[in-house]
Image (cartoon, helix red, strand yellow):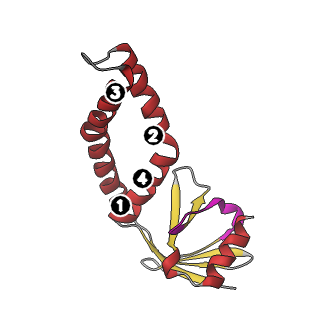
Amino acid sequence: MVITKRIQTTYNTVLRAKMYFFFRKSIWMYLLGMLMLGYAFPLENVGAISSAFVYFIIFALVILVPVYHFSTRAMVRKAHLDANIEFNEQDIIIRHIDNNNIETKSWDWIKRIDITRKDILLIVDHPTRFLIALEKSKLTAPEIQFFLEKKK
């Protein structure tokens, strides 16, 4: 089976990948840090856990949201990708639209396949975290089955 999908780096796709990695890994580190901060410096008449929650909300709104917004905009400008990616049993072929370059990758290039309720997420083995998100609603049943088999 051969599956061809167009992949583009846009603000939404990059932010979606960043949010995926944030909720997968980083949120626990921030919550633990805010819990320690709430324990060390509790707000007046409020417990440590409630203080940690308030600190986390303030930290998210003042620091995380702007940092994620501006880093996403910068990444879209720097790491532009507009390509047709062909997935087959043996390998993955990336046909770049803007410069007519063709890359062939083995399936080892995909570090992990995560399947959620709405998406199939291909986490790429790349020095900078890279994610290819395929919406299940835009895939046929045999295409979804193909990725389920590749996940094993």
Could you tell me which secondary element the residue under label 4 belongs to? Answer: helix
In this view, the mark in front (2 or 3): 3
Q: Quadrant of the N terminus?
A: bottom right
x 68%, y 77%: residue: 146
Whether residue 115 is visible to the viewer of this picture, yes or no, is yes
Task: Residue 124 in the image: state x and y as whole percent.
Answer: 59, 59
Q: Earlier in the sequence, mark 4 or mark 2?
A: 4
Tell me the residue that label 1 is attached to: 76
Q: Amino acid at mark 4?
A: Met
The reply to whether discs 2 and 3 touch (Cβ–Cβ < 8 Å) is no
Tell me the residue that label 4 is attached to: 19
**For the residues marked 1 and 2, what is the alpha-carbon distance in whole angstroms?**
23 Å
Q: Earlier in the sequence, mark 2 or mark 3?
A: 2
Tell me the residue that label 2 is attached to: 27
Tell me the residue that label 3 is attached to: 50
**For the residues marked 1 and 3, what is the alpha-carbon distance in whole angstroms?**
37 Å
Instruction: Read off the magenta span.
Output: 105-119
Task: Residue 21 in the image: state x and y as whole percent.
Answer: 49, 50
Q: Earlier in the sequence, mark 1 or mark 3?
A: 3
